[in-house]
Image (tube, rainbow, N blue to C red):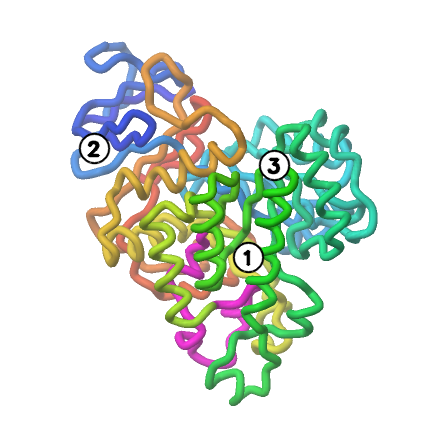
Amino acid sequence: MTNLVLKSVRVVDPATGRDETADIIISDGVIREDGVTADGLTVINAAGLIAAPGFWDVHVHFRDPGNTLAETRQSGAAAAAAGGFTHVVTMPNTNPAGDSAEWLRTQIEDSLPVKILPSACITRGRQGREIADLADLATAGAAAFTDDGATVADETLMRAAMTRAAKLGKPVMDHAVLPDIAGNGMIRDCALASQLGLPLFPPEAEIAAVVRDIRLCRETGCAMHIQHISCAASVAAIRAARAEGLPVTGEASPHHLALAVEDIPGDDGNYRMNPPLGNRTDVRAIRDGVLDNTLTLFATDHAPHTAATKDHGFKKAAFGVIGLETAIGVTWRVMVAEEGMSILDWVARWTLGPAALLGAPAPNLAPSTLADLTLIDTRKPWQVNPGTFRSLARNTPFAGWKLPARAVLTVCQGRTTFRDI
């Protein structure tokens, strides 16, 4: 268990509104009252660093089971800890798919350096034809239900699933893209699409799905979470739904906040994702949605792939990019440095927003609690080098970027799980 003192650290705790310089004392993994002394503690001069509750990511893929060359639970958890995360929600689009209590049990492993909160499938085998045994999955520990990687296109089936999920008190998370509209689209309209002859992804494929999901939320009362928002009209629809009082949330991924389709440098598979990058108007709307709390949380959609599936150009590349080890730096650069977002609000999008979605207690740095903490260094930029990642994958669009913030210490449930200070 962790035994250390963070001297003169900036404590940023959105749950209490605390933003002040103080000492944090952790003894036997527990946060102690300020001013309490204990023997045998390692003292870290943390002046100029930020201590926040451990970050949560509600949208990660660890590819385990089924594609462990791309990522395992162990490598994904190590990447999460290095990124400052203490809790992650894994997606069930594995092989086999996560539609059974047995699958859920294999996801939860106490020895990992991050707490895994697995989501489970909405439909059996993620096939979109028959609802999975949601009650059994909830009992086995499912944090939420999703067929991530695909939406449940059958509206009658989705309504029935949401009705059941509402009774279980679990949110439904949707990869909101209607396949009949999306077709084989892989990129938004831009000069590069014409140059490479790439099929276009119409924004209506996402927007129509978001509007449908909001309507089903209204009808069923089920908490609906829209994953990886990429379109301005989707942000507007979620803003209106929340103003109506509906339990609708949406997430902003670092890549959709930082990059527009116009920024893709060429025939590079590391920029292919689903949904694809929006245009600059979409990026502006997503940032505004974060700033005004329409989008209440960040999430990486960490999607590892092997080099063989990403290194042969945009058209042949698999969908998805990784993000756990660059998330702090990218979102700080975009939202704090460029947009002027308050640090309390920025931390809240990585802590309070995710926990509220899952119905979990607000992450905090209160005394007498088991420490879940990330220590962040914003004093000097660092350059993204995928070769140093803990993740097995290297498929990032941020290689070579200079980022202004990074995690240098992570404490999860009282244990130090990452340290680079």
The structure residue drawn at horizontal position 52% and vertical position 43%, both measured from the top left corner, is 248
Would you call the spot at circle 2 few (<14 residues within 10 Å), some (14-19), or many (20 or more)? many
| Callout 3: SS | loop
> In the picture provided, is 374 more to the left or to the right than 93?
left
Percent across and percent down for residue 233 are 47, 62
Q: Is residue 362 magenta?
A: no
**Which corner quadrant holds the C terminus?**
top left
Give the CA separation, mark 3 to mark 1: 39 Å
Which stretch is magenta?
252-277
Q: Which x, y percent locates residue 68?
A: 67, 50
Does the image show residue 79?
A: no
Q: Nearer the viewer, residue 247 or 368?
A: 247
Q: Nearer the viewer, mark 2 or mark 1?
A: 2
83 sits left or right of 157 in the view:
left
What percent of the width, then of the height, locates residue 341? 26, 48
163 lies left or right of 51: right
Q: Which residue of the protein is positioned furthest toward the bottom in this rendering?
A: 195
Q: Nearer the viewer, residue 291 or 363?
A: 291
Give yes or no for residue 270 being in the magenta stretch. yes
Q: Is residue 95 above or below residue 282?
A: above
Amino acid carrying label 2: it is Arg
Disc number at residue 10? Answer: 2
Of labels 3 and 1, earlier in sequence is 3
Circle 3 sits on which residue?
221
Q: Dot 3: within a 10 Å radius of its alpha carbon, few (fewer than 14), some, or many (20 or more) residues? A: some
